[in-house]
Amino acid sequence: MPEDRATSLQERAATLEAKAFQASELFKVLAHKNRLQLLYLLAEQERSVTELETALSLSQAMVSQQLTRLRLQRIVSTRRVGRRIFYRLNDRGVGAVIAATLDATAAHWTKAHA
């Protein structure tokens, strides 16, 4: 019986290692204040570059640079309507991660700096 437990734990650890690697790669991409803000807004709905620039008071160059990085990682995708480009999240789960992370961080920050 102890061998079965050890094998099961090793199998779970191998699966955990793969999941942890995938999560760490995602968090590397998310580890930028502007990208987090962009993704939070995109989790609500599809938005144009102009809408994102205005909402976040960021330059067109900054917004485009961050959206390009997210698009290359396949976190967001685009849709063109005339001259306007709209961005949307490819996976709603990423939006949930962003919201949960921002909420948890805000709660921690409030407690730690009270």
Image (cartoon, grey):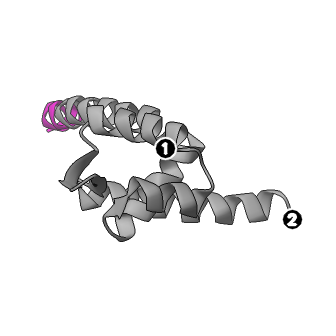
Residue at image position (60%, 49%) is: 58
Instruction: Give, as a single range, the part of the protein colored magenta.
Output: 1-9
Name which residue type carries label 2. Answer: Ala
* Image x and y of residue 45, in percent: 33, 69
Does the magenta run of residues contain 4?
A: yes
Neighbour class for label 2 at 10 Å: few (<14), some, many (≥20)? few
Position of residue 105 in the picture relative to residue 29 (left or right): right
Q: Identify the residue at image location x=76%, y=65%.
A: 110
Amino acid type at image mark 1: Val
**Residue under numbered circle 2:** 114
Look at the image and tell me whether residue 98 can be seen. no
Label 1 neighbourhood size at 10 Å, few (<14), some (14-19), many (20+)? some
**Position of the C terminus by quadrant:** bottom right
Residue matched to label 1? 63
- Residue at 28 percent across and 44 percent down: it is 75
Considering only vertical position in the picture, is 72 above or below 43? above
Task: Look at the image and say whether residue 54 sits in the magenta stretch.
Answer: no
Mark 1: secondary structure: helix
Q: Residue 14 versus residue 37: which sits nearer the camera?
A: 37
Q: Is residue 108 left or right of residue 22?
A: right
Identify the residue at image location x=16%, y=37%.
Answer: 8
Q: How many marks?
A: 2
How far apart are the two marked residues, 1 and 2, measured between alpha carbons?
33 Å
Position of the N terminus, as image quadrant, is top left
Task: Give how far across and how far down residue 9 sits, in percent.
Answer: 23, 36
Q: Position of residue 107 (x, y in %)?
A: 66, 66
Q: Is the magenta stretch mostly helix, strand or loop?
A: helix
* Relative depth, front residue between 5 and 87: 87
